[in-house]
Amino acid sequence: MEPLDQTRIFSNRYELTHLIARGGMAQVYRAHDQLLDREVALKVLFPELSVDQTFVERFRREAQAAAKLSHPNIVPIFDWGEDAGNYFIVMEFVDGEPLSTTLREQGVLAPTRAAMIAANVAGALSYAHRNGVVHRDVKPGNILMTEDGAVKVTDFGIARAINTEESLTQAGSVMGTATYFSPEQAEGANVDARSDVYSLGIVLYEMLAGRPPFTGDSPVAVASKHVREFPPLVRDFNAEVPLAIEAVTMKAIAKAPGDRYGSADAMRTDLLRFVDGKPVDAEDPLIAAAAGAISATTMMDAISRTQAVPVFPGPRTDVAGRRKSGNRKRRWLIGVSIVVVALVLALIGSKFASNALKSSPTVPSVVGMTLTKAESTLKADGLKVGTVNQVASNAPLNQVVSTNPGVGLPIAKGAAVDLEVSNGKGANEVSVPNVVNQQLLAAEATLQGAGFTYKVVTSSTPPATSGSTVPANTVLSQMPLANTKAAKGSIVTLTIPATPTTVAVPNVVGQPTSAVGGLLTSAQLTIGTQTSQCDNSQPLNNVISSNPPAGAQVAPQTAVNIVISSGSCNTNIVPAVVGQTYALAQSTLSGAGLTSGTGNCTSSMTVASQNPTSGTRVTPGTLVTLTCSTTTTTTS
């Protein structure tokens, strides 16, 4: 944390004092909230991003969504705004350090500690996923560790403001992030909660192994390895890691989303099983890989057995010499068994193929050819074209996608080969979900979950003119229509209400200041001046009044000035005067800021009771009734 040479105040409230970190999108500062007299963290977008209004609008919506997350392991967002063209988010200031610093200083963490940190992060992710927010940038730099051991995840939803393609190509936007990409994120495909599970698995891997599974000279090179290479086992780098936690880690970073934990909560449950010393659900990664390899080998057809050996993502050959434990021997024996099985099956297939080839020709490889080219190839081999069927496919129109008999299988001379060719319409067409009447943020999540992208247009008629009462950012219509078919990845156009000519000021009286920013932003308004004064009707830091008041119709983006309670106004405490003479009671009340009047009590009479009673807080001038024996008098 670096002190700033020159301080700056955002929105006449947040005074920047220290630079905490610089990321791919913004700089994070420690700041003092002058209104509430507390320390906060301010994330300020880079100027080059602030000029892109599409980006800023997405950034605003994501900040608004993240502000709704309230979880002990999530850094809360208090406010967001703009100052002189600089957009910023106000978050809780966490007095601690990021996990990245801990890893840099300690190298590896104890397995139980690593599991507990990952379980806390998984709990935060699970809560966010249930509320429709996918983090997309889970990494040690976004996991904060407090001095008392608490774990907090920050930057929820903010990573959604840039897409994966930008992350891989824009300078600085993925520095230190591509290491934790999921394969589908690296490919630019749609991501869901299981992408966060993968990224958390990479973080867990690094905590246990002292390094991430994939490294490279550039972010693109690392992202490519996530897609194409199997990770080495954790115990290749740290032989002391228990098998159970390694199994959890390797399941979380499976290439295919369907092979991972189905949710962050499922991963958290398995991590806590490990911490409690119970068996985990995740399989031994080596045995699972072995079963997959043998299955893949035995499922090959007789001809293809001579052409392929299953890829086995097992122990690395460059570290085999370092393995001395029984577990390492077991892995070596399993690996050798798989290779032996594969070779035996390959030899059988080779003999079968050799005998078959002696007796008849085989179907040539025409898959991927145009129909015309395939016909000429078959004719050149003494074969002819049989039935030609068009099928749905992503391949170009009339490109061969399969044959019957299959490529490489024996066939009699002069026999016909049936062909399936692409109709060019795409086999990945799916039903478009209905997002009409949804809020834009929810509609986006629905469409992305179904594999679509989207763009937004506004209605040509402003709500104030049409008399519409539809809330802002509500989807009025969509194209393609709901339940029609469209290719995955295609664009769905969403129409939302045009910017209204006026908007209503929401009622913020009685609201804590931390909630005011979100309420006004949702109403397309901004926070104006903020003053404070004492008030006996509202507790500390709650809004006393607003100007314009609640219900007033104003232009969008109008600044709403608010008055905030600084606490109760000064009050007087009623002194105890029972037992005093009436003359002394008058003097005592006068000294307490209460003036006494005349009454039926005489100066020498003793006060028998008083109302209000002693110790009561009252404003100056509150009436106090004194009773002297059977005579009552009132002071004011």
Image (cartoon, grey):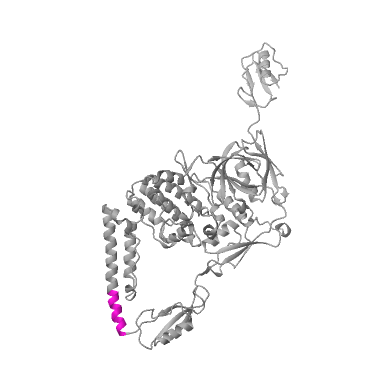
Using the image as rendered, state which of residue 619 and residue 367 is in the foreground. 367
Identify the image quadrant of residue 216.
bottom left
Identify the image quadrant of residue 284.
bottom left
On the image, the x and y values in percent for residue 320 come to: 30, 56
- 25 with respect to 365 (left or right): right
On the image, the x and y values in percent for residue 562 come to: 68, 41
- 483 with respect to 534 (left or right): left
- 120 with respect to 410 (left or right): right
Q: Residue at x 27, y 70 (%)?
A: 344
**Quadrant, the C terminus:** top right
Tag count: 0
On the image, the x and y values in percent for residue 60 come to: 60, 52
Provide the residue span drawn in magenta.
348-359
Is residue 384 something that shows in the picture? no
Q: Residue at x 53, y 57 (%)?
A: 167
Residue 378 lies within the magenta run: no
- In this rendering, is residue 392 above or below 87? below
Give the overall secondary structure of the magenta segment: helix
